[in-house]
Amino acid sequence: MTGGAATSRVASFARATLRRLRSAVGGPDSVRRADLRAAQRAYQPPAPAPARPELRVAVAADRRLSSLLAWEWTQRELTPENWDTVLVDGAVDLVLVQAPHGRLDGWDGALDRCAEMSLPLAVWVTGTVDADTSWAERVEHVFVDDERSLTALPGAELLPPAVQPRLHNPSVGRPRQQATAVLGPAVDQFDSGKQDVWDAGSLPVSGPQVSGYPVVVQRQSHPWTVLSALAGGSSLLTTSTEGLPADVAEHVTVVEDDDALRTQLTAHLYQPELAEREGHVLGRIVRRRHSVARRVETLAGLTGRPAGSPERTVSAVVPTNRAHELDNVFANVARQAHKAVQLVLVLHGLDAAALEVEARAKAAGLTEVTVVEADSSLPLGACMNLGLEAADGDFVAKMDDDNFYGTHYLDDLLDAFDYTDAGIVGKWAHYVWLRSSGAVVLRSPRSEHRYERLVQGGSMMLKADVARSLRFGDDLPRGVDTDILNRAQREGIKTYSADRYNYVSVRGTDRTAHTWAITDAALMNRAGRLVFFGDPREHVDI
């Protein structure tokens, strides 16, 4: 046996012995919690790729905040030992110093040097203030992450806690932990599931802090940690919303006492749909409104730079040869919360003037509509490419004329581009409504929030440059979606399957009317689950 192999066996034996000891002393749950902490320590986040590399910032912060900000700008570490060198070389546009609980010891010289150089300086106070803040008189831009700190620092501005979607998102921590994360004391007399109890000392400083849990219970204030969990899709039970942004607090479950907490926790664990729906809405709010990128917009404004980039545009390409589905198309696009959308309607053998397409689209509330007329002899792939050529958006969404698209359909797919490396995003986990029987089937339920080879064709969104480089198969009458997804995979372009909500594939009573001809019974296989009977549109539109 080689020396390396012997060392490995000894290490394995030592780990196994330690696990047995932990189990004997604290039970199986103590072993599992130790494994979780080890996984957290071993987590290696992807290397940051700054969104605004032209913005150069010297940052003095703990590892958590520093790791979140590193994705947003070109960052230089600032310490009490190196500040003189970093500031003097002139390669800095802004200085940001974190002041935990208002403490700013050791930075007097740096404050003076920034004033001498007229270099923008911001101090971000994290946590409630419990220290002398006389230093604030020398700092023009003071921010606090808790509005309760405004009493101690009346001239400060509120800059709440934030998350980094590249580190805090639904794909981190999958598959989901079948337990509850408790921030603070364990929930007494509760035995309906396992509890992973985390306190401030056991939480890792950087990386995803509490990820992959269906439910998080906040018993002590941990606003930064709570937001990171919510960004990953967790639901939240809490006794107090202090320290949380108002729009987040509006959607969490607040309990008054331990009896109510145990009741709610039982409901959230035994009814996963409850926790998952709450977590989906909270995740959207946190990633979209409380990302570090939003905080950086405020900080970048101190340098005179533009606050942020313009809203991303989407071109929704919809081919149709069914005049009776036009109103459904208009309603789907008009329903979207994301308003920077261009409808590219490809009329396949239909007459736009005869159908009064533009007037009907305007009546539905649409302002950006491009109509392309395609000869009825053209195959579907050629029609899609005509639509692609007319598309002006940063992203191209392929939408079907007969499906249902919920209010946040475009929002959620755009969101997934912010935290993945995908060139194509869609839904492989999705609902199918079999109108012949009223059955609603959830297909591929395990394929949420992970990279896949395929996604449902009517749910695809592509980066515009990816769509134009791949194009659809001009000569294909059907199967255009599978074809472009397979070619994307061969070229190393990743496809990500997002959440199951805000989209329903509708199967009418005449299956021959669909491009994808398949029997209803064939959709009820082991890849799907019959979830209920009835109209699913209200259920998925969240």
Image (tube, grey):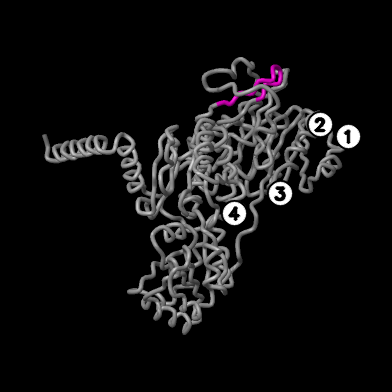
What is the secondary structure assignment of the residue under circle 1? loop
CB under 8 Å between discs 2 and 1: yes
Q: How crowded is mark 1: few (under 14 residues within 10 Å), some or many (20 or more)?
A: few
Residue 363 falls left or right of residue 370: right
Dot 1 corresponds to which residue? 354
Label 3 – label 2 distance at C-alpha: 27 Å
Q: What's the residue type where badge 2 is placed?
A: Leu
Q: What's the residue type where badge 3 is placed?
A: Lys
Comparing labels 4 and 3, the label whose residue is closer to the camera: 4
Dot 4 corresponds to which residue? 289
Q: Is residue 151 located in the magenta-colored stretch of the structure?
A: no
Question: Which residues, given as a range, are shown in magenta?
Answer: 433-443
Mark 3 vs 2, N-terminal side: 3
> In the figure, residue 358 lies in which quadrant?
top right
Mark 3 vs 1, N-terminal side: 3
Comparing labels 3 and 1, the label whose residue is closer to the camera: 3
Dot 2 corresponds to which residue? 350
Residue at 42 percent across and 37 percent down: it is 189
Mark 4 vs 3, N-terminal side: 4
Residue 339 disc label: 3
Residue at 47 percent across and 57 percent down: it is 71
From the top left corner, tell me how far across and down residue 308 is, in percent.
Answer: 60, 61
Residue 541 disc label: none
Label 4 – label 3 distance at C-alpha: 17 Å
